[in-house]
Amino acid sequence: MATILIAEDEQAISVLLKYNLEKVGYDTICVAHGNRVLSAVEKNVPSLILLDWMLPEISGLELCKIIRNNPDWKNIPIIMLTAKGQEEDKVAGLSAGADDYVTKPFSVPELLARIKTNLRRSTNIASSIKKEYVFQDIVLKTVEKKVFRGENYVQLGPTEFRILQLLISNPHQVFSRDEVLKTVWGQSIYVEPRTVDVHIRRLRKALNEFGPDYIRTIRATGYSLDDHQVEE
Ligand code: CA
């Protein structure tokens, strides 16, 4: 069943939401402070977030932007809750990346209907993303963010994981350092091309502890995941 994070500092509303959501079968997590929201999401990625606009310490609007900028969290549906009904707030909320917007006082049945719609939409997105990639004995699980070689769990840093995901989703295809940089770090961040080599070295070291080296280095070109013996 879906887990819904309730980020709301007014206890009466938080209790009301928790009661009604659990009554229809959702699991809930409640936080009342802006600065607890991110750690709660980190600990247990929710299926949907009900995010109050006016939270102490960090506003709901700021949190919404932070969550949207995180590649792991950007698809979590966010419904903003607010006492303000003004049109400009609604626009600000939606442009910060909220999926929906509910003005207090809200009707519980209406909110439940919106939650259902937003969850259905995000399930459709999630099911279009491949859950698992396999190459020889290497298995990369996109949801759990885990990599295995045979029975062995391979411990990877987040950057190494993303590089492997790129390579394993397109085996035998050669990626230049620039392509790896753009895909893994994004267009906007400047990273030295040599940084790619450092992370590839770490990825190799972690993977090869449990089996043969399938990462191919093509001199002056880039990298690929390949099981054919090729001269370098
Ligand atoms: Ca509030």
Image: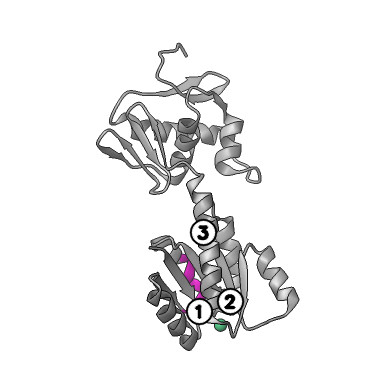
Magenta range:
32-38
Q: Relative to 101, say whether 199 is above or below.
A: above
Q: Relative to 228, say whether 29 is above or below.
A: below
Q: Where does the image place residue 136, in percent across and percent down from the top left?
A: 35, 26
Circle 2 — which element? Answer: strand
- Which mark is in front, 3 or 2? 3
Which of the labelled discs sits on residue 125, or is there none? none
Q: Find out if the beta carbon at label 1 lies less than 8 Å from the nearest ligand 1 atom.
A: yes
Q: In this rendering, does residue 51 appear at all?
A: yes
Circle 1 — which element? Answer: loop
Mark 2 burial class by Cα count in 10 Å: few <14, some 14-19, many 20+: many
Q: Where does the image place residue 169, in percent across and percent down from the top left?
A: 48, 33
Horizontal side of 68 relative to 22 (left or right) equals right
Q: Find out if the beta carbon at label 2 lies less than 8 Å from the nearest ligand 1 atom.
A: no
Q: Where does the image place residue 41, in percent across and percent down from the top left?
A: 45, 64
Q: Name the residue under label 3.
A: 120
Q: Give the CA separation, mark 3 to mark 1.
A: 23 Å
Q: Which amino acid lies under the numbered mark 3 shown in the image of this protein?
A: Arg
Mark 1 burial class by Cα count in 10 Å: few <14, some 14-19, many 20+: many
The mark that comes first in sequence, 3 or 1, is 1
Q: Mark 2 points at which residue?
A: 81
Q: Which amino acid lies under the numbered mark 2 shown in the image of this protein?
A: Leu
Residues at badges 2 and 1 in contact (C-beta under 8 Å)?
yes
- Which mark is in front, 2 or 1? 2
Which of the labelled discs sits on residue 8, or is there none? 1
Q: Give the CA separation, mark 3 to mark 2.
A: 20 Å
* Residue 84 lies in the magenta stretch: no
* Residue 34 lies in the magenta stretch: yes
- Which mark is in front, 3 or 1? 3
Q: Which amino acid lies under the numbered mark 1 shown in the image of this protein?
A: Glu
Q: Where does the image place residue 220, in percent across and percent down from the top left?
A: 57, 20
